[in-house]
Amino acid sequence: MTLKVLGSESAGNCYLLESFFEILIIEAGIRLNDVKKALNYDLRKVIGCFITHAHGDHCKYATDYLKAGIDIYTSAETIQAAAISGHRVHPIQANTMIRIGEFKVIPFPVPHGVPTFGFLINHPFSGSILFVTDAAYISNKFNNLNHILIEANYEDALLTSDRAVGKHMSLDTCLEFLQANDMKQVRNIVLLHLSRVNSDAKLFKKSVQAIAPNASVWIADKGLEVYLSKYPF
């Protein structure tokens, strides 16, 4: 399983989880043509797109994805706010597992000011993947995670305004979450949605690495690819 980051910022968010046989998209915040380019203009392996919430940098291009034959999975509130409809739009509920291809996805609510989901994703090739972006904090605890994709948007000392506070996850909150959870099997931690002005990628990576010395820590820059395997090399 390979994670491909196509966008992880306020300009647009989109991630691909690509196995040998199928591709799951998370977020529809970048142009469909950019997704096509990343997939060599072949969408046949795409089995669906999960969207966390209705802000434009996460769902702006959902209608274009639908027109291309990509099914969308998101909350009823996001469906209404994003004004999307049709037989390829699938409302999902918190804490109810969805099976799509070989993926199993459990959505769970996170605080962001609008209805927002995080996703616990399982696949035979990757094991358990936690995906959370655009959340002030995560109240859930998790066991047996193999990979964590988590927002680290800002550092208090670097804040130029309080706009992100209460809606996005600070570095300190991210660190607190990681320390409170079972990290024994975590092989990769990918830091998502860093603020352009209120973050420091080197500091964030070093801080996370200090509390997770056995994991590989990555910054979700556009173009990043990370191999997400259930097993050690």
Image (cartoon, rainbow, N blue to C red):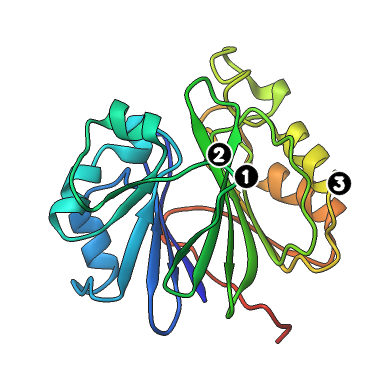
* SS class, disc 1: helix
Whether residue 206 appears in this view of the structure is yes
Q: Callout 3: helix, strand or loop?
A: helix
Earlier sequence position, callout 1 versus callout 2 = 2
Q: Position of residue 151 (x, y in %)?
A: 60, 41
Residue in the picture at 53% in, 65% down: 104
- The residue that label 3 is drawn on is 179
Is residue 129 positioned above or below 40 on the image?
Answer: above
Q: Which one is closest to the eye, mark 1 or mark 2? A: 2
Q: Describe residue 91's horizontal placement relative to residue 105 as left or right.
A: left
Q: Position of residue 68 (x, y in %)?
A: 15, 59
Circle 3: residue type: Gln
* Amino acid of disc 1: Ala
- Residue type (three-letter) at the residue carrying disc 2: Leu
Which numbered disc covers residue 194?
2
Mark 3 / mark 2, whichever is N-terminal? 3
Q: Position of residue 74 (x, y in %)?
A: 40, 43
Contact between labelled residues 2 and 1, with CB atoms less than 8 Å apart: yes
56 and 160: which is toward the camera: 56
Labels 3 & 2 near each other (Cβ < 8 A): no
The residue that disc 1 covers is: 201
Picture quadrant where residue 124 is located: bottom right
Q: Is residue 58 above or below residue 31?
A: above
How far apart marks 1 and 3 lie (CA) works out to 20 Å
* 140 displayed left or right of 116: right
* Foreground label between 3 and 2: 3
The C terminus sits in image quarter: bottom right
The earlier-in-sequence mark between 1 and 3 is: 3
Mark 3 to mark 2: distance in Å?
Answer: 20 Å
Residue furthest out toward the left? 67
Tell me residue 42's x, y (percent): 20, 75
